[in-house]
Amino acid sequence: MEIEGRDFLNTPPKKTVRFGGTVANTLAKLQKGDTSDYELIKHQLSDPDIKKLPWLGRSQAVVEEYLAFLSNLVSAQTVYLRACLRMVVTNFAPKRIRIQEGNVDISDSDDEDENLPRTFDHCHQALQLIARYVPSTSRFLMPILSDKFPFVQKSSRTLECYVHNLLRVSIYIPDLRRDILELIISKMLTLDVSAPRSEIEEVESGAQQDANGASQDECLFDMDEEEDAPLDSSRADGAVMVHPVAERLDTMMAVLLAYIKDICHVNGSLDIEKTKAVYRDLVSVFDKVVLPTHASCHVQYYMFYLCSFRLGLAEAFLDHLWKMLQAPNQPPVLRQAAAGYMGSFMARAKFLPVSTVKACLDLLVPWLHLYIDSQDAGSKAFCDINLHGPFYTACQAVFYTLIFRHSAILEGNMKKGLAYLQGLNLERIVMCQLNPLRVCLPAVTNMFAAITRKYQLVFCYTIIERNNRNLLPVVSCSTGGNSVSTNTNPLDTFFPFDPYLLKSSGKLIEPIYQVWEEPSDCMIDVPKKQVRKGSMEEEDDFLHGETPQGDSVVGMTPGSYDSHLHSPRSFGSPPVSFLQRPF
């Protein structure tokens, strides 16, 4: 394409400086040593029209000329570095089309620009030129990237483009990778905690029921009209979340997981050194941002996905959590969170072999015995969450792991597996004066009791019944009237790797995720006087009437075990009817 023609039929005219010359002529004079006109251009940079020079979407000749001007400017006068960086970063998100009627905005939709990839390529080309000429670019760029991050309530398309471009920056400016990952994951956590698991499940199940009803109506009146197609067809696979916050989070998670996979793999094979570097950055972000965040449902799965690439990564992550759990200088809340992550990871990671699970149990269980040795004879040998929080959370992690993994441990060689479980001496942990069964979630306690009774490892029911008799209700007047409630989750527990609800990114998680499969050895013999004839639904209704309901329980979290069990699409946990069945 000729420069003189410039293909400007559908583009604005060339930008000129105030004295009447063109930018190209000024740069030509600068190359010859004449800097007078160039100095005038620099002074004009304070003009908003100059900063908004429409160089994107123009012909290749105009883009190249502008990039040359930009590189000369930042190399000669770094005082304009921030302004240039802001100009480039502003274009990391698609422009918005705003339609006005009178003085009222009636539309603010995404601009579906076919040249968007080309625009982003030119932005990154400009940023690479700036970084090449100004070594301190990374120091000034990161605050701008954070400041220009779109509001989390923006559209999924806007967030997807910006996150994608941020991750692309981390490739050619690797010094910023950890900070960029921290920024993205922090924004994703904001979305994650604002969309509780129960809320997502309710919205999605309601939409599914509406869709089923609509499909039945279409069967009655099938007009074969194209207009009746679903309104949201942005994804060919139909993996669109109805919950708006979950849809944004799903989009961002898909971009992040795809980035992790692409960075760690070269030509389809895992690059060990690159994977180690990414692992170090992501673990650092995990410790700083994810671990202290309570009841997040999905963001932490980036570590779950990364560890599935190689067993060594999973073992390193478990070792990292184990060191944090046993470190006395760490805050108790972080030690408890580490124990929760450790137990949930061992239970849910399908790629984790039994040998690794047993190795972790061989660390956790002796630590519990040592803790009992140090406390049983002392003055603090009583049940107190504030004093022994990490101990109770570690006990629950062991119980939870055995619930999911006991079949695999016993598989193949029953005698050898039973000998291993007996060697853990679980009875001493259950019977100790610290009484861990009193503070663990009832769902975990009941399932653990059923399994250990089946194999005659521990008989927990005497302790459970005694704890139930000693569990006093709490009278609360905070709501304006007296209400009686029982706190069944004193540890404020949540299992970070409960079932993944996001549809699009969940396709990467599903193959490596261990769903709950109710074993045949967990059936509990119900006393005859409590057995009623009828369907299973009738039995469930009767049992639910005899047990406290979720709205009368204090301290339950959206990601907790019990609240998750009540989900209509709970494909990954033991059934409520079994866990709450009386003995």
Image (cartoon, rainbow, N blue to C red):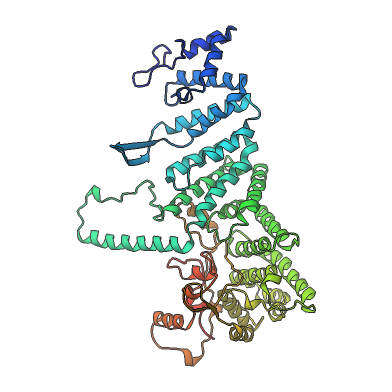
Q: Residue furthest front?
A: 480
Residue 274 picture location, percent across and down: 65, 42
Question: What residue is drawn where x is 41% and y is 31%?
Answer: 115
Q: Residue at x 50, y 67 (%)?
A: 564
Question: Which quadrant of the view contains residue 471?
Answer: bottom right
x and y percent of residue 181 in the render?
59, 44
**Viewer can see residue 159:** yes
Q: Quadrant of residue 12?
A: top left
| 212 relative to 152 in the view: left or right | left
Towards the viewer: 248 or 478: 478
Whole-percent x, y for residue 561 in the image: 54, 69
Q: Is residue 304 above or below residue 111?
A: below
Position of 352 with respect to 152 (left or right) is right
Left or right: 402 as drawn, with respect to 48? right
Left or right: residue 501 compared with residue 332: left
Is residue 408 something that shows in the picture? no
Q: Position of residue 429 (x, y in %)?
A: 71, 77
Q: In the rendered image, which quarter contains the C terminus?
A: bottom right
Numbered-mark total? 0
Name the quadrant of the N terminus. top left
State the residue in front, 105 or 570: 105
